[in-house]
């Protein structure tokens, strides 16, 4: 196997508690969002003025209501964060349909932990029109920040929510009923400290889950999967395969690609130019055959993965020791190595 992360990033350093799994059917898909987004909600919320308090965002129509999934579990499904430029997006915002889900061309840039990276560029994002009240408000409040949380493949890459941060650090979620669905529950979750909600920006995967989900009492270790750090009983239930990994020739930067299964992390490979692709690396898989592929920082900090690039399920014929599993990644890696746009993972054709 290739060189493992440092001992500080070993199983002991990345152990965390078991997270609750929310069934897909329990989520309120914000593509239909807020208090409904369906035909059962006819009354629209009154327009929010930039002169209003930030707390005015996210109100509910008088008619209709929905039972929302717990806010922490919903936020934990975020696969990507972007920051919106309200001024450059104003024309698209003004012409967008506020009563339905549609593609809106917004000026955005990648939002990472602690900062937003790169220059803004236009990107079509599928979202519910009621989220745009946050941009209306931000246009009249130049110190405001607007972040969108984008779901992964399970949510067809749609915008899950719009977080607005005021000049004094106050936080609100824009869109129909988002005050009761997200703002109030998350403030309660974080002891009424909006800074802790703002600190979620840029987190995805296990790092985000660790920040928002309350753990049950029994801890479960998440390990780097190798004979030195992982209990023999765990490895005995897994199959060691060889991944043949290929990435676009342009992918070069301070980043790392790692594979992962439910039981823990597999080998990683840097994108610093030191490795020629395609390359091979070892990976453990379980009986499901599901392999996740993640983008991490240059140091392969497992506690703070940057972005889940995708996952693939290998056929049963390949869930055997020594099998060669081809994985081909596509998309565009940003120059800072902080994200991949239009990321996709193509696995083997075997569907056995």
Image (cartoon, rainbow, N blue to C red):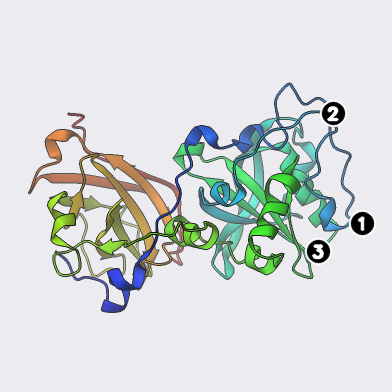
Q: Nearer the viewer, mark 1 or mark 3?
A: 1
- What is the C-alpha distance between the residues marked 2 and 3? 30 Å
Q: How many marks?
A: 3
Q: Nearer the viewer, mark 1 or mark 2?
A: 2
Q: Nearer the viewer, residue 159 or 178?
A: 178
Q: Residue furthest right?
A: 51
Of mark 1 and mark 3, the one earlier in the sequence is 1
Judged from this view, the residue extending furthest toward the top is 39
Q: CA distance from mark 1 to mark 3?
A: 12 Å
**The label number, if any, that marks residue 43 in the structure image:** 2
Name which residue lies at 70% across and 67% down.
193
- Residue that mark 3 sits on: 142
* Residue 192 location (% of width, % of height): 72, 64
SS for tag 3? loop
Could you tell me how far apart the alpha carbons at marks 1 and 2 are, in whole angstroms? 23 Å
The residue sitting at the front extreme is 217
Badge 3: how crowded within 10 Å, few (<14), some, or many (20+)?
few
**Quarter in which the N terminus is drawn:** bottom left
Q: Is residue 170 visible?
A: yes
Q: Which residue is mark 1?
A: 51
């Amino acid at each position: 196997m290739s060189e493992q992360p440092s001992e500080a990033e070993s199983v002991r350093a990345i152990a965390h508690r078991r997270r609750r799994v929310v069934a897909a059917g329990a989520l309120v898909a914000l593509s239909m969002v807020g208090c409904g987004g369906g035909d059962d909600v006819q009354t629209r919320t009154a327009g929010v003025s930039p002169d209003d308090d930030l707390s005015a965002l996210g109100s509910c129509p008088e008619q209709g209501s929905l039972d929302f999934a717990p806010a922490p579990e919903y936020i934990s499904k975020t696969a990507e964060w972007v920051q919106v430029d309200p001024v450059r997006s104003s024309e698209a915002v003004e012409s967008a349909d506020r009563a339905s889900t549609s593609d809106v061309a917004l000026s955005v840039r990648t939002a990472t932990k602690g900062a937003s990276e790169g220059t803004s560029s236009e990107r079509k994002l599928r979202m519910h029109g009621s989220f745009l009240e946050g941009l209306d408000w931000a246009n009249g409040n130049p110190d405001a920040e607007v972040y969108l949380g984008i779901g992964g493949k399970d949510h067809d890459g749609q915008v899950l929510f719009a977080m607005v941060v005021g000049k004094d650090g106050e936080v609100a979620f824009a869109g129909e009923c988002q005050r009761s669905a997200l703002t109030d529950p998350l403030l309660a979750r974080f002891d009424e400290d909006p800074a802790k909600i703002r600190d979620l920006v840029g987190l995805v995967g296990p790092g985000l889950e660790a920040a928002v989900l309350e753990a049950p009492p029994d801890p479960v270790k998440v390990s780097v999967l190798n004979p030195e750090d992982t209990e023999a009983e765990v490895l005995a239930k897994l199959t060691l395969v060889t991944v043949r990994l290929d990435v676009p020739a342009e992918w070069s930067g301070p980043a790392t690609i790692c594979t992962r299964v439910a039981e823990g992390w597999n080998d990683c490979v840097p994108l610093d130019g030191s490795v020629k692709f395609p390359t091979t690396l070892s990976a453990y898989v379980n009986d499901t055959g599901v392999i996740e592929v993640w983008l991490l920082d240059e140091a392969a900090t497992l506690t703070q993965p940057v972005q889940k690039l995708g996952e693939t399920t290998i056929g049963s014929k390949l869930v055997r020791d020594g099998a060669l599993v081809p994985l081909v990644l596509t998309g565009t890696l940003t120059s800072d190595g902080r994200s991949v746009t239009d990321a996709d993972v193509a696995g083997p054709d075997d569907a056995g």
